[in-house]
Amino acid sequence: MLQTTFIRENKALIIERLKKRNFEGVSIIDQIIELDDKRKSTQQKLDAQLTESNQLAKQVGEFFKLGKTEEANKAKEVASTLKEAVSSLKEQQNEIAQQLQELLYQIPNVPNEMVPSGKSDEDNEVVIEEGALPDMGKEALPHWELAKKYNLIDFELGVKITGAGFPVYRGQGAKLQRALISFFLDKAIENGYEEVIPPLMVNEASGYGTGQLPDKEGQMYHMTVDDLYMIPTAEVPITNIYRDVILKENDFPIKNVGYTPCFRREAGSYGKDVRGLNRLHQFDKVEIVQIQHPEKSYETLDHMVKHVKGLLNDLELPYRVLRLCGGDLGFTSALTYDLEVYSAAQTKWLEVSSVSNFESFQANRLKCRYKDGEGKTQLVHTLNGSALALPRIMAALLENNQTSEGIKIPKVLVPYTKFEWIK
């Protein structure tokens, strides 16, 4: 959420940058400024009334001390009328604050200057491409057929137990999944991240804190009886660890990593792009989160992208890095890099990670701050990234490493799987 002071001081810049998002609600910015003016004038009236009320209270006491009962009672009557006016002004102020908050929730984050203009994922900018694309030939099997052939993942059993998008991993498939999770966690810990195991459900305040609410409530599983939400990503509970926290400058950087199942309704998803592991309602992911000093957040973003690239290099998967255009940028992000791996049997790129800098957008919602060198309270910057999401990594590993003898396991995973081949 943008700060009203930032909006006032940077109105022209915000309007210009939001054009990259094709954002049509620019008029809301004027409404916010008008409401903020109203809030300030109402506060001034309220402060004046409170001052007068306090002075009258003192006068009443003094009159009673002097035995001036009549004057005291008259002052009490005036004070009572004033009290009603103060109460009315407080109600107005609360209504204005609520209206202002609702408008602020509608404004997405301001894109960084590096964000390219564009309307959809077709306009994303390819930053780098690494690794030779494998040519498996027409006989190559997609991962859902390989999963069935080697009894690795049972999609039909998942439909029986729960529904489409909830696969059951079995045998070597389950071991490979667990190996990937352990490998990703270990590499993050080696790079200075502290592991946390967060809850898989969050309250409404946590959803608002990281921006899933009110923007993406339709994509989250909502437990209505207890008013809790299944997490769409570990970013939500991990980042909310720092909600309503004031840090010190020497606390930076704060680095957390967590493995969790993730739950997404994926409403409206259908067709060939959702086959197999391509799009699920429940999937596993290892998430890295950093809380950083504003001056170092973009340097940190580069380090986080480098970390994810290192994982893909270790897995010997061809990949590319995309800088998302304004039209494809997430609501809360100022700059996002997507990393995609190449799927040999499907002959297409699959997104496996998004690494984002939210600048102070989430921090303002979370009220996550720090004390600078002068003792002033400032907002932190928050960042997060998938390191990595499991389904499409699994899909690419199975497809790209299939041979006539079976599926070859990347060397880096063998100490975790305890086997070199799936046969």
Image (cartoon, rainbow, N blue to C red):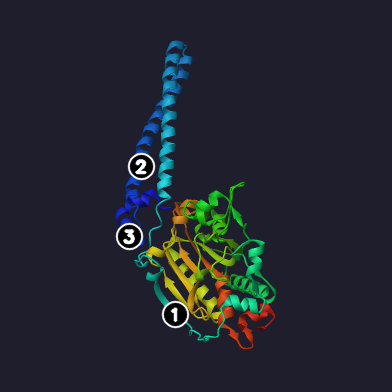
6 or 337, nearer to the observer: 337
* Residue 14 locus on image (x, y percent): 33, 56
Element type at marker 1? strand
Q: Horizontal and vertical percent for residue 27?
A: 32, 49
Residue 11 shows up from this direction = yes
Which mark's residue is nearer the viewer, 2 or 3? Answer: 3
Q: Is residue 352 visible?
A: no
Q: How many marks?
A: 3
Badge 2: how crowded within 10 Å, few (<14), some, or many (20+)?
some
x, y percent for residue 199:
62, 57
**Residue corresponding to mark 3:** 19
Q: Marks 1 and 3, how far apart in space?
A: 28 Å
* Residue that appears at 68% across and 74% down: 175
On screen, residue 106 above or below 393: above
Residue 27 is left or right of residue 338, and the answer is left
Question: Mark on residue 35?
Answer: 2
Residue designated by label 1: 129
Nearer to us in this view, 246 or 315: 315
Name the quarter where the C terminus is drawn.
Answer: bottom right
Q: Residue 184 sits in which quadrant?
A: bottom right
